[in-house]
Amino acid sequence: MAKSDTLHLQSYDLATQDISTVDLNALHALSISVGWPHRQVDWQFLRSVGQGLVALDEIGRVFSSSMWFSHGEDCATIGMVITSPRVQTHGGGRWMMERMLDECGDRRVIVNSTRAGYALYISLGFEFQAVVQQMQGTVRAAAALAALGTEGVEEITPAELPALLALDRAAFGSDRTNLVSRLAPLSRIVGLRRDGVLQGYAMRRAFGRGQVIGPIVAQSEEDAIALAAPLLADLEGRFARVDTRQPEGRLRSFLLASGLAVFDTVRTLTRGAPLPKVEPGRPGIYGLAAQPLS
Ligand SMILES: CC(C)(COP(=O)(O)OP(=O)(O)OC[C@H]1O[C@@H](n2cnc3c(N)ncnc32)[C@H](O)[C@@H]1OP(=O)(O)O)[C@@H](O)C(=O)NCCC(=O)NCCS
């Protein structure tokens, strides 16, 4: 009898498990398989501020992940939704997302969607809100140095965290105490004060290939630039990233001049309530904490 030219090998029975139980190596390998820059410590941080599931086969290989992050009682962000390329388009992504949405309950949910995830999220009731520009590159400090020196921009001390959290809440629309207070010890933080009142803040920390600047909470693009400038000024020749929903304008021109070009875009979708508007004169999100954290 002639031998067949085809061999059917794909047969996986996957079971879910809490994401906190698996080896960071396995999560790292999963995010590398879809070209994401997360290091093991980045996964470790995300696990410390959120919760989620992985799907494993019977010999413990991780084939997919998904996480959600609670921001107060009324908001959640979903992220780190990954299906290994080996088993994509077989329903695993939808299966994981439905479980995440069950866990989020009746919170408003925000997700920053890649092209690959978009149809899935729309089919689950999410609505388009804004485009996020992922701007990154090797820092040219000249632009940042030229933008330095705005009166009232200074380093923030831990004692000022309550004021910072109040400002963040006004910008984000929900209480991010858990996230922001865990980012704080890992970050360099600057604030912008006028008449003794905190008007904006920005954080910078190690992430992926270099440093990420975010969140940036400000009341105008000019203030966002004043906050980002000192965090970029000492990074000459190093890799930095800012994720922003600001349309083309002064902030994006400043980031471009500082060496951060648009590397990719994702789309912010929400379920349950729209994203708070960013308008001059009131606190708004000018830079994301991270894509899964919004
Ligand atoms: C997005 C992702 C998680 C989807 O995982 P998956 O296991 O392939 O998803 P599913 O098989 O459940 O498919 C979900 C829906 O998306 C659609 N879909 C899946 N892959 C698609 C693709 N490459 N292009 C267009 N649509 C696609 C399917 O048609 C499916 O719709 P249906 O249930 O009505 O048939 C996966 O592609 C992935 O890990 N991509 C890389 C990482 C990423 O971008 N994650 C999303 C972060 S927001």
Image: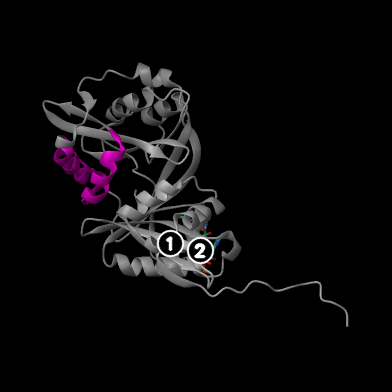
State which quarter of the image contains the N terminus. bottom right
Q: Quadrant of residue 50?
A: bottom left
User: In the image, what residue occupies the spot 21% across and 31% down?
Assistant: 156
What range is drawn magenta here? Answer: 160-188
Q: Evaluate if marks 1 and 2 touch, with contact meaning CB atoms under 8 Å apart.
A: yes
**Would residue 13 be found to the left or right of residue 246 on screen?**
right
Residue under label 1, please give it. 22
Disc with the residue nearer the chain's start (1 vs 2): 1
User: In the image, what residue occupies the spot 37% across and 61% down?
Assistant: 20
Q: Quadrant of residue 240?
A: top left
* In the foreground, 165 or 51: 51
Q: Is residue 15 visible?
A: yes
Residue 114 is a magenta residue: no
Label 1 Cα neighbours within 10 Å, binned few <14 / some 14-19 / many ≥20: some
The image position of residue 286, as x and y in percent, is: 32, 38
User: In the image, what residue occupies the spot 58% across and 59% down?
Assistant: 85
Residue under label 2, please give it. 62
Q: Nearer the viewer, mark 1 or mark 2?
A: 1
